[in-house]
Amino acid sequence: MRNRRVACAFVAGLAVTASLPAMPENRLREPMGPLTFCPQNPRYFQNASTGEIVYLTGSHTWANLVDMGPSDPPPPFDYQKYIDWMAKLNHNFMRMWTWELISWDTRANGEGKHHTTAPHAYSRTGPGLALDGKPRFDLTRYDPVYFERLHNRVAAARDRGIYVSVMLFEGWGLQFAPGAWEGHPFHPSNNINGIDGDANADGKGVEIHELGTRSVTDIQEAYVRKVIDTVNEFDNVLYEISNENHPASTQWQYHMIRFIKEYERQIPTRSGAAGPQQHPVGMTFQYKDGTNQVLFDSPADWISPNPDGGYRDDPPPADGRKVVINDTDHLWGIGGDLAWVWKSFTRGYNPIFMDPYDGDVLGERLDPKWDSIRRTMGYTLRYAHRMDLSKARPNPEAASTRYCLANPGNEYLVYKPTGGGGSVTVNVSTGTYAYEWFNPASGQEASRGTQTISDGETVFQCPVQGDAVLFLSKVVFPALDCAPGAR
């Protein structure tokens, strides 16, 4: 259909009625979770108690569970300050990182730091000393400090409206950090249980994240049960099997996903709950040479892909096979920009950022280079709260920029990248719409009003230089009482 340029039509008496609702502070409109599959729109989770769609976005950083730093013991991470910072940015999701190794040599990350890490899941009881000169681990006993911290930090996140994906294992460090295997509890010199996870004796030990040694898997399953018993009560919990494990870990990860689901089914129902507490389980990109198809074929509820297929530069429209948490960690390491956040959001994804945060582990301290990403995730969450995401779908054909999340005839959220010209064309159904132009660089609304549109392609002139967001919401007029005698 030929483009029609339509002038703004301000309807008399409609200025208040058409005003868009103010962006809410960091809070969900209903109590949190538990999260469950959303049959109406499987691109997102929904609150199992209320049915409300839950869009997830936020910063995560390495030391948010296990302290990391150059001293021994490492300096404590200020977790309360971190979640307060997240809440101020209007974030509602983090990956809570574990670290299986007793140290982290960052040469493989392009830096020259050597971190010690603590606490660890297993107790260091001895007898005998591990390779670092401290008591050996007993793999059948757990460090109460680790699990008390896990419990309390999930609870604190809940109190700030933040969902937490509890990472169970970590695979990148074991593969690439210098001296990693010598610092793993499953090294035979580091435990009192006779466990040697290096089945092929190549000095790497990556086989612990496979299914080749039953005694190793038994210990891992017991640990997973302990984690679940620690946090099962919380509604704001998800699980992630392992960060960036090697491709040969596929069947082990599939096994652990099924193990979690089965174990949670066996936990007695909480008082007043409709059934056993079931939390979403995720599988993330396998580094390196892993494929996204392995993730989509998995029994996981959510996944995080690698760049293949455009997830970094031009994400394909999410098709709902899985909830996809699009994570900069698996696309760049540390990277991305505000355009990537808007592209991910308008294509039906849940974008999150691997944040250097205080710079104590990697990167620079609160590097302002990343502020636009941090703020933009909060902006997208505010728009998610304003939209009916149960009916919104990525709809590239509806907008000239091809970045559009739409509930046709009701709501359209369009992202215009910088350099995209001075206007946006949107294929809009007939009606009167409240419109809003938003400047993501400044975080300010640029203009708003109402516009009556005939069915078809409509040109909207953009008042913003550079990146811009256009939000259209159909105005529903109140019914008039026209009965005889009505006044």
Image: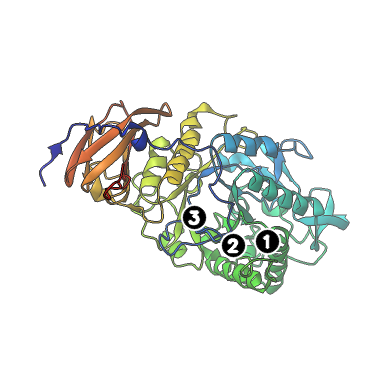
Residue 15: image quadrant is top left
Q: Is residue 140 left or right of residue 266?
A: right
- Pick the quarter of the image with the C terminus: top left
Residue at position x 56%, y 43% in the image = 27
| Marks 2 and 1 in Cβ contact (< 8 Å) | yes
Name the kind of residue labelled 3 in the image: Glu
The disc, 2 or 3, on the residue closer to the chain's N-terminal end is: 3
Mark 3 residue crowding within 10 angstroms, few (<14) / some (14–19) / many (20+): many
Q: Which residue is mark 2?
A: 279
The mark that comes first in sequence, 1 or 3, is 3
Would you name the residue on which mark 1 appears?
Answer: 232
Up/down of 482 relative to 231, above or below: above
Instruction: Report the number of discs.
Output: 3
Above or below — where is 246 with respect to 439?
below
Q: Is residue 192 left or right of residue 393?
A: right
> Quick one: 418 or 345, which is closer to the camera?
345
- Vertical comparison of 3 with 306: above or below: above
User: Residue 259: percent from the left, percent from the top?
Assistant: 62, 71
Q: Are marks 1 and 3 in contact (CB under 8 Å)?
A: no
Residue nearer the viewer, 395 or 77: 395
Decide: few, some or many residues near mark 1? Use Cα within 10 Å; few <14, some 14-19, many ≥20. Answer: many
| Label 1 SS | loop
Front residue (pair 451, 283):
451
